[in-house]
Image: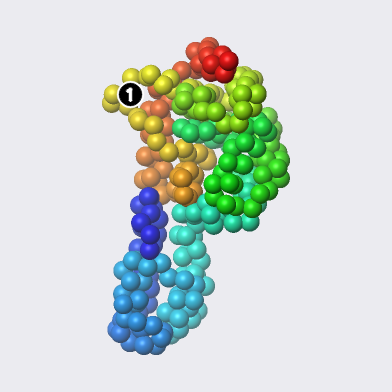
């Protein structure tokens, strides 16, 4: 089992392992007997029971059969899959391209009322222009070796962005200043993206704060991974290799507190516009 960057995933896996161990104990059999009945090594039983190895659906069915508890297999498999969904490699999520992933998240965006977004590397998806999104997704697809359906994925992302002006949604967005200066696409793409940002920040649904590159951070929050909070009940954290879903209350609180501290570092209104205009001027 890989080491996950969130304790919530580890806790979910540990709870699943405990459930399997209790099944074995209730059946009155040893780990050695279970291994014999399942047709695998004692070491494998131990790894599963101690949450070292994540069991496959087939492993769970075999475990339940050995314990005379076939009827519990579906529920345990469902719990296992839920734990898996908390940490998903981009390679797995994008194995058929980017369009499907964008479509899957569209419903989440539609039902979310309040978004809190911290952008430390690139513009948030709902603020991207078609040119910026195309350049970014093209780079990602090339790096990860995913099928090239960039144009279709960009179209879905643009449709998803309509939540900015439709329905009762609110977007609290924090962007590190260096995101304004990262060249995604050519000069014209960046100029268009920054101009779009100026226009979008005027929308009543949007609160945009920019954290100046030279801001004094002693005792405050340092730049870290990009994340999105959905209605204070779910957080998506974007790592280089994977997307992590956070739902554990304790971890939700950590990200919400971090967002609040980052918000204190940001500038808004005229000061934020000045930073965007400076980035546009730097394009030459």
Residue 125, horizontal then vertical, whole percent = 59, 36
Res 26 seen here: no
Estimate the x, y position of residue 27 in percent, counting from the top left. Answer: 36, 83
Task: Name the residue rendered at 54%, 50% in the picture.
Answer: 144
Query: Quick one: label 1, few (<14), some, or many (20+) residues within 10 Å?
Result: few
| Vertical comparison of 72 with 113: above or below | below
Quadrant where the N terminus is found in the figure: bottom left
Image coloring type: rainbow
Q: Give the side of residue 176 with respect to residue 161, left or right.
A: left
At horizontal 48% and vertical 81% (from top left) the residue drawn is 70
Dot 1 falls on a residue whose secondary structure is loop
Identify the image quadrant of the C terminus. Answer: top right
In the foreground, 73 or 156: 156
Mark 1 lies on residue = 217
Q: Quadrant of residue 184?
A: top right
Return the residue nearer the eye: 62 or 22: 62
- For the point 38% across and 34% down, which residue is it? 257
Location of residue 238 in the rendering, given as x and y in whole percent from the top left corner: 48, 43
Is any part of residue 85 visible from this angle?
yes
Pick whichever, 220 or 187, lies toward us.
187
Image coords of residue 199 (percent x, y):
64, 20
- With respect to residue 107, does 274 lie above or below? above
Q: Is residue 204 above or below residue 46?
A: above
Residue drawn at x 31%, y 77% is 43
Report whether 34 appears left or right of 82.
left
- Residue 32, by quadrant, is bottom left
């Amino acid at each position: 089992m890989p080491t996950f960057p969130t304790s919530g995933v580890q806790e979910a896996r540990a709870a699943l392992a405990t459930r399997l161990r209790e099944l074995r104990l209730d059946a009155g059999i040893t780990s050695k007997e279970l291994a014999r009945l399942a047709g695998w090594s004692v070491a494998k039983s131990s790894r599963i029971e101690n949450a070292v190895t994540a069991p496959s659906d087939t492993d769970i069915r075999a475990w339940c059969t050995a314990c005379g508890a076939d009827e519990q297999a579906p529920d345990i498999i469902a719990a296992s899959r839920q734990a898996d969904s908390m940490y998903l490699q981009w390679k797995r999520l994008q194995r058929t391209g980017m369009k499907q992933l964008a479509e899957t998240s569209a419903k989440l965006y539609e039902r979310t009322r309040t978004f809190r977004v911290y952008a430390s590397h690139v513009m948030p998806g709902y603020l991207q222009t078609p040119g910026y999104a195309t350049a970014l997704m093209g780079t990602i697809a090339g790096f990860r070796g995913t099928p090239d359906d960039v144009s279709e994925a960009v179209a879905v992302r643009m449709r998803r962005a309509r939540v900015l002006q439709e329905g009762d949604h609110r977007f609290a967005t924090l962007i590190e200043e260096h995101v304004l200066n990262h060249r995604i696409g050519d000069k014209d793409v960046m100029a268009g993206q920054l101009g779009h940002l100026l226009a979008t920040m005027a929308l009543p649904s949007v609160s945009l704060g920019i954290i100046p590159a030279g801001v004094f951070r002693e005792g405050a929050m340092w730049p870290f991974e990009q994340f999105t909070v959905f209605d204070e009940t779910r957080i998506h954290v974007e790592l280089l290799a994977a997307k992590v879903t956070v739902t554990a209350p304790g971890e939700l609180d950590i990200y919400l507190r971090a967002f609040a501290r980052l918000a204190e570092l940001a500038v808004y209104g005229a000061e934020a516009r000045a930073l965007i205009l400076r980035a546009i001027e730097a394009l030459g």
